[in-house]
Image (cartoon, rainbow, N blue to C red):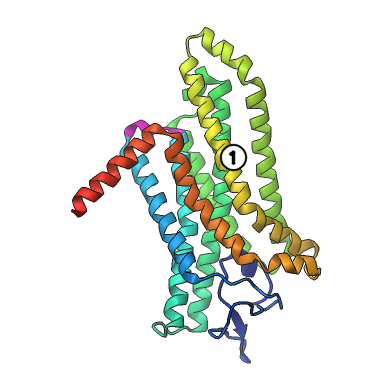
Amino acid sequence: MNDSLRHHFSMKHMDYMYNSDNNITLNSSATPGDTNATGIAQIMIPQELFLMLGLISLVENILVVVAIIKNRNLHSPMYYFICCLAVSDMLVSVSNVVETLFMLLTEHGLLLVTAKMLQHLDNVIDIMICSSVVSSLSFLCTIAADRYITIFYALRYHSIMTTQRAVAIIAVVWLTSITSSSLFIVYHTDNAVIACLVTFFGVTLVFTAVLYLHMFILAHVHSRRIMALHKSRRQATSMKGAITLTILLGVFIICWGPFFLHLILILTCPTNPYCKCYFSHFNLFLILIICNSLIDPLIYAYRSQELRKTLKEIILCSWCFAM
């Protein structure tokens, strides 16, 4: 597999090589510290750790989605967007679990690998991961815009952000994410694809930062107007939602930032020794990405009493049913 977007974007913690017929084969003899196709010595991480983190993250995000669906008090545009953000995290978890199980079964001789099967799996996983990052960034921007409208257009919020519009936004985001991800994978050999991803990451962060700056600078002045209309409780709730989003965005930057820096270095200094040293930590960046999917549900539960209450009910019901 060539040194391209799909090699750097998907969770490639297994080694591949070309045989004489240009078919892809699994290098099952790879050991920690071996070099990949680019000649970079990779830091190896046990596959069992990937599997464990992926399963925990998957269960957590499923619980969040079920809780939002179950509790009618959470049926609002903001929680619809949070639900979609949880689904985006689930894509990372599912792709990681599927790939890791595939690798473990192959290594133990329980699954025969063909080049065609490997390529199909590769395509599906790449699209899932790419869709996850594009949709996550899009929904973070959407939640930021939703909080902005809630704070600065509180009296008109329900007429501006209707359920129908929220559903339409969600449909557009998912359609765009899946379509763009498919195109990215089709044209994965072009550096312009990596540049587009990095640019999209930067634009979304700038957009969200501008909204935050405006929100937190003018929040005090606007809160006086809201309080004058006896809507102080709504203002406090809106600001709490904005703070929650700030935490989510901060965690996203910390967990995905090293990966996007990895992409930037691929474009700017692919042969530089220092860059190659950074590339060798790629598997650690994958662990951070999975940790983002694992941490997000904890943030939802910590910041939302209603969601936390529903999650407790679901867990207790599941426990009683199991007993």
Determine if the magenta segment contains residue 73: yes
Q: Main secondary structure of the magenta part?
A: helix
**Residue extending farthest bottom:** 20
- Badge 1 crowding class, 10 Å Cα cut-off, few under 14, some 14 to 19, many 20 or more, is many
Residue at image position (54%, 46%) is 173
> Splitting the image into 4 quarters, where does residue 45 fall?
bottom right
- Examine the image and state in which quarter residue 56 appears: bottom left
Q: Which residues are magenta?
A: 72-77
Residue 56, relative to residue 215: is it above or below? below
The foreground one among 285 and 157 is 285
Q: Observer-nearest residue: 1 or 176?
A: 1
Where is residue 89 drawn, in percent x and y? 49, 52
| Percent of width and height locating residue 237 | 48, 24
In the picture of the structure, the residue carrying the numbered disc 1 is 141
Instruction: Name the side, left or right, on which 247 lies relative to 67.
Output: right
Residue at left offset 62%, top offset 49%: 254
Q: Is residue 220 left or right of residue 57?
A: right
Position of residue 5 measured from the top left corner of the image (x, y, whole percent): 66, 66
Q: Position of residue 41 (x, y in %)?
A: 68, 75
Let me know if residue 272 is in the magenta part: no
Q: Residue furthest top?
A: 228
Q: Is residue 196 above or below residue 243?
A: below
- Reply above or below: 312 against 44: above
Question: On screen, 241 above or below 175?
Answer: above
Visible in this render: residue 185?
Answer: no
Q: Quadrant of the N terminus?
A: bottom right
Residue at the (43%, 34%) spot, across then down: 304
* In-image side of 16 versus 306 (left or right): right
The amino acid type found where label 1 is placed reads Cys
User: In this rendering, does residue 300 appear at all?
Assistant: yes
